[in-house]
Image (spheres, grey):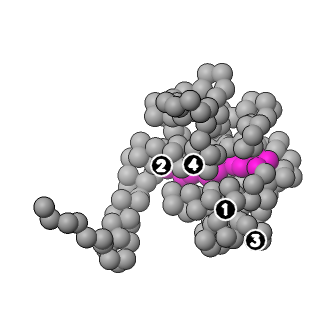
């Protein structure tokens, strides 16, 4: 049996570049997250999916923050972010900019994330690690998607959920 070998860095970059082009624009809205380590992980996810930006609202920790820096491995410097103290201001601004707000939450009329038709300009809205999204934030969203859980747990880490839905959205829309 022949062993596979790891690709060199230049080959990896070429592989990623050939597969990365997509017609979807992605942003992430982090509503009142508590844990700066989760925010740092989210910056890594945002960079990996080619997100346009991250929106941090309320008490969500923001760079510069030592724990964000540690977890993000510098990706917080690659993905633009904005902070809005008020969630309603974020919703209004994002809608005015043409973003479709898609809640990642188990909400009424939420669709399976693999069966949803993602708009070309999708902003995934992700709630607090423990409490989830606030009712007024869910109401500001055009739709909601959920990730079915096969095990006994009710959820996965919030930035893991973001990665799952964002990569699915990228795969489902036509590539350039």
Residue 125: percent from the left, percent from the top?
67, 43
Which is nearer the N-term, disc 1 or disc 2?
1
The residue pinned by badge 3 equals 66
Label 4 to label 3: alpha-carbon separation:
21 Å
Q: For residue 14, which numbered disc appears in the image?
A: none
Labels 3 and 2 touching (C-beta < 8 A) = no
Tell me which corner region of the image, top left, top right, bottom left or bottom right, holds residue 172.
top left
Residue annotated with mark 1: 40
Q: Earlier in the sequence, mark 1 or mark 4?
A: 1
**Horizontal and vertical percent position of residue 165:** 52, 43
Q: Quadrant of the N terminus?
A: bottom left
Near-viewer residue (175 or 116): 116
Query: For mark 2, does the 10 Å Cα neighbourhood hold few (<14), some (14 to 19), or many (20 or more) residues?
Result: some
The mark lying in front, picked from 3 and 2, is 3
Location of mark 4 (residue): 160
Q: In this view, does 142 lie to the left or right of 114?
A: right
Percent position of residue 52, x then y: 60, 59
Q: Nearer the viewer, residue 126 or 92?
A: 126
- Tell me the CA gap for discs 3 and 1: 10 Å
Q: Reply above or below: 8 against 116.
A: below
Q: How crowded is mark 3: few (under 14 residues within 10 Å), some or many (20 or more)?
A: few
User: Label 2, on which residue?
Assistant: 167
Task: Give the magenta-colored segment's residue range.
Answer: 24-33
For marks 3 and 2, the one nearer the N-term is 3
Find numbered disc 4 in the image and state the secondary structure of the residue it sits on. Answer: helix
Q: How far apart are marks 3 and 2 (CA)?
A: 28 Å
Question: Which of 22/164 is in front?
Answer: 164
Name the image quarter holding the C terminus: bottom left
- Report how far apart the C-alphas of labels 1 and 4 lie in the structure: 12 Å
Closer to us: mark 2 or mark 4? Answer: 4
Can residue 52 be seen by looking at this rendering?
A: no
């Amino acid at each position: 049996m022949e062993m596979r070998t790891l690709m060199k860095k230049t080959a990896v970059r070429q592989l990623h570049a050939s597969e990365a082009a997509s017609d979807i624009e992605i942003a992430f809205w982090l509503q009142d997250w508590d844990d700066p380590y989760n925010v740092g992980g989210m910056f890594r996810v945002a960079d990996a999916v080619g997100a346009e930006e991250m929106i941090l609202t309320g008490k969500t920790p923001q760079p510069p923050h030592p724990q964000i820096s540690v977890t993000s491995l510098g990706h917080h410097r690659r993905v633009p972010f904005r902070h809005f103290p008020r969630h309603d201001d974020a919703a209004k601004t994002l809608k005015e900019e043409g973003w479709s707000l898609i809640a990642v939450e188990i909400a009424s009329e939420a669709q399976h994330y693999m069966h949803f038709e993602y708009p070309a300009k999708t902003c995934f809205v992700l709630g607090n690690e423990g409490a989830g999204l606030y009712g007024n934030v869910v109401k500001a969203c055009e739709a909601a998607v959920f990730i079915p859980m096969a095990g006994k747990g009710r959820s996965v880490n919030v930035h893991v959920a973001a990665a799952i839905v964002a990569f699915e959205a990228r795969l489902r829309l036509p590539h350039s």
